[in-house]
Image (tube, grey):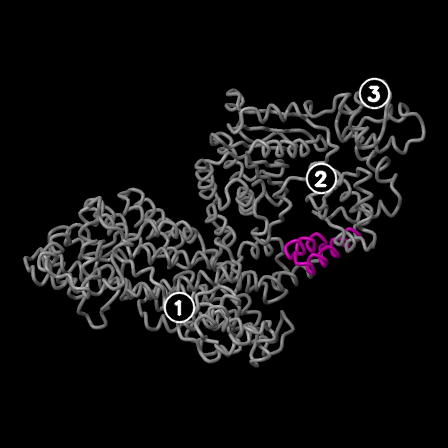
Amino acid sequence: MTQPDLGALHEGLIASKLAPPMQDPRAISRAGFVARAVDGLPLRRLIVIVAPAGSGKSNLMTELHHAFVEQQVAATWLGLDAEDNDPATFALYFISALQAIEPGFARDELTALGANPVRDYDTLFDRLGNRLSALSTPGAIFLDDFQHLSDPGILRFLDRLAAHLPHHLSLVIASRHRLPLHLAKLLVSGLVTEIGQEDLNFSSSEAEEFLSRYHQLQLSSSDLQSLIDSTEGWPTGVQLAALALRRHKGPAAELISTFSGRDLDLTRYLVESVLQAQPEHVRSFLLQTSPLRRMRADLCAAATQQGDAQAMLDYIGQANLFLIALDREGQWYRYHHLFAEFLQHAFRKIDPAGYRDACFRAAQWCEVNGYPTEAIRYALDAEHFELAADLIAHHAIRASLFRGDHYTVRDWIRLLPVEFHTRRPEILLSHAWSCAFSRDTTRAMEVSQRAIDLLSAEPPRAWDLSTSERDRWLLWAHTVQAATKACSDDIDDCLTRATALFAQVPGTEPFLIATLSNCLSYGYFALRNFERSREYALSAHEQGHRADAAYLSAWGDFLHGMIDVELGQLRAASSLGQRVHRDSQGLGLGQQSYVAGLSALLDAEIAVQHCDFDRAMTHIEMGRAFKEIFGPVEPQLVALRNEARLHASRNRLDLAVQVLQEGQDAALREQHRRLYLALAQEEASLQITAGDITGAAATARRTRLLDAESGNDIASRAQRDALKLMEARFKLAYGDAKSALRLLTTLQQTRGAESCGGFFLTVTTHRAIALWDLDQQKEAARQLNRALSAAAAEFHAYPIFAAGRPLLPVLAFISDRRADASTQDLKPLLDLQQWLASNLRGDRGAIRTEEAFPARAATETVESLTSREIELLRLLQAGLTNQKLADALLVSVPTIKWHLHNIYSKLAVGSRGAAVAAAVRLALI
């Protein structure tokens, strides 16, 4: 309850920052402050602790945290440092910390940040504030070391949060400096509890207890009072004095009389009374471990090259040398910030080369032990920029291109000096890829072009590569540029580049083939050439699994599913959505992942097409992050359009319009013309469906949607047809059925016109309305029946339902003609017909979608397994590993993974054991 799910943290985050230090049972309790703080919980509290370093702020924060939890208040923790003064980093840690109060809090924003560090952070913080206001769970947010924050955007957010704390939410802040927040009104209102230096200073009795518990020291009353007078009760001053007194041979009063314990004497006493008093091997250990942000025995051993690291940590802890445990197991520690800062300063001054060497060894240890982000930061601390660049080159390709972790990659490269960006081609290419998928396509093209120029130079200037290696990286660089063109929605250029590259890439490069296949599938989908798009989507699925790149396969399946939706094949689309979802589960990517987001978008689209808006709502929530991230237009369009349709289905046209207009603004900022037009059309369409013709006309004027001189000289037939359909709807709304019919007939009868799917249903339905308005009732009924017949088997209701109430008289006419028809063969059609009539009338007793279309949840038949897949199942039954399976079948491990994915998909399972059990049950083996 009190800690976030640290196992699910974003890879670049340090888990220990999100948990309070362990409570030292010897610590002096500040029970009075704690009692006042928890009095009246769970009502909101704002507690501000401001005092210099070494005053016991963190100890008090830890005690308060424990007390809040005991009061059944979910408490979260964030220990801040200098790197958190970046909006993206702060937001990642802040949202991750809030999982302790509400698991899944702001998961869309968390997903967005993990993939896309370039965004409007003021808007993000506004949304976080709104989400916090909606929390109903009593909670408390603890922010330690607030003095590291100065970014204006972060401070504006926290200022607003403090000023408008939700009723059941408390905020506890500790800082070395006065808070740069506007708290005057809150202070007057009595909502703020302030704790300062004077409050934290030890009294005589507290100092006496501290000396006894920690140092087994007993001072006379006069000596104790002298110590309090000289240190003013400053806890660190008392601690330093105690360390000195333990080694002092003369009377205590003799030493105390020379000790002020304040800042001017702090360095001298640390050096003389603490550091210099330690044995040489302890002093060396303290200095050499000072650069470590967190430490454990084997890391310390690597940094110091001393084999007794655990014994040294035990000694330092027992000697009370400012060592703080970060977990209950006693595995991870850190030094008190004040002590660490002093040691680092002393180490740099005494032995600057030794400081860099310790950082270098720490980087090597972190790399070997799976902490790449910390390894890179230690390499940078060591000023060993070649190592940092090599580490980035080693990890960035997989992080960026295979996992879509663009925040981490761009953060690494931000920290690396510019002159080292060209050390390895992997750095430039992963940087370019992450820029492309972070809506920074101009930068992506610049960086990838730089790689191409360096690779193409004669003679080679940058890298010592063989001719085959140079040719391979050139293919990668050009593929990154093709993907960048897809992200910027430059469809023609994307198709031109991807088509040329597809013919050049060898079969040994499945990642490149999958990427180019997705580019081609995406481009042809935008042009509504669904046959070609499906062909390449299948290739992307297969090659993505060969490359062990889950999200490339997911993109292929997503596009394939969207093709099926457009063609009205909703069951097939649902199967693909399940396959993407199983990908996410099987690969351990979690609900917040890129892959799960694609699955949610597809599921939401299918649910909306079924007019099952209750089911759509869940998936829309999961897929909402795509409004903010991931570059390409199509997921953003699906996310925005379905959220707007959900609002409209609940008679909240105002919210629907707001969603779409915000999307239009973003599209203009990103120069995504196709997205802007599609959202403008959706806005006008929803307004016409709701009967708001005036609003629809205003939308058309504002967006110049139907203005022949507006620049809408679109080359794509798909966009031209969509605009013609929009024009026909306006003409119907204004009573010009004759002109509308001409446009709709052209759309229906032109060579190559679609004969199934959503666009066909929309055109045919509106053609029926036009015919009805022209008193051609029988032909209108035939047209609508054509649409109903095409939609009934899949209950593809939305394209017909979206025509609105003008459809009712045509439905009534058909219903009268079919009054006696009740054969089983007509049941799906009659169910759809009845559902449409009831819901368009707004009948409260209208049948639910799931009642009208129960077959939607019917058990799917198992797809046929190939002979190779059955052979693999038999080997699975024997319990062989992937490597042994590959050896047995004389194929690669990625090929085995691809076959396993297909088996899991066909059998609708998610594990080896389940696959074998299903195969036995079905008598396949």
Q: Is mark 2 in CB contact (under 8 Å) with mark 3?
A: no
SS under mark 3: helix
Report if residue 366 lies within the magenta region.
yes
Q: Residues within 10 Å of mark 3 (few under 14, many from 20)?
A: some
Answer with mark 3 or mark 1, whichever residue precedes in sequence: 3
Q: Position of residue 292 (x, y in %)?
A: 72, 48
Answer with mark 1 or mark 2, whichever residue precedes in sequence: 2
Q: Is mark 1 in CB contact (under 8 Å) with mark 2?
A: no
| Range covered by the magenta-colored residues | 354-383
Q: Is residue 735 above or below residue 212?
A: below
Q: Is residue 552 above or below residue 94?
A: below
Q: Position of residue 384 (x, y in %)?
A: 71, 58
Identify which residue is drawn at 64% across, 33% down. 61
Q: Position of residue 176 (x, y in %)?
A: 66, 32
Q: Which residue is mark 3?
A: 226
Q: Nearer the viewer, mark 1 or mark 2?
A: 2
Q: CA distance from mark 1 to mark 2?
A: 54 Å
Q: CA distance from mark 2 to mark 3?
A: 27 Å
Q: CA distance from mark 3 to mark 1?
A: 80 Å
Q: Is residue 608 above or below residue 156?
A: below
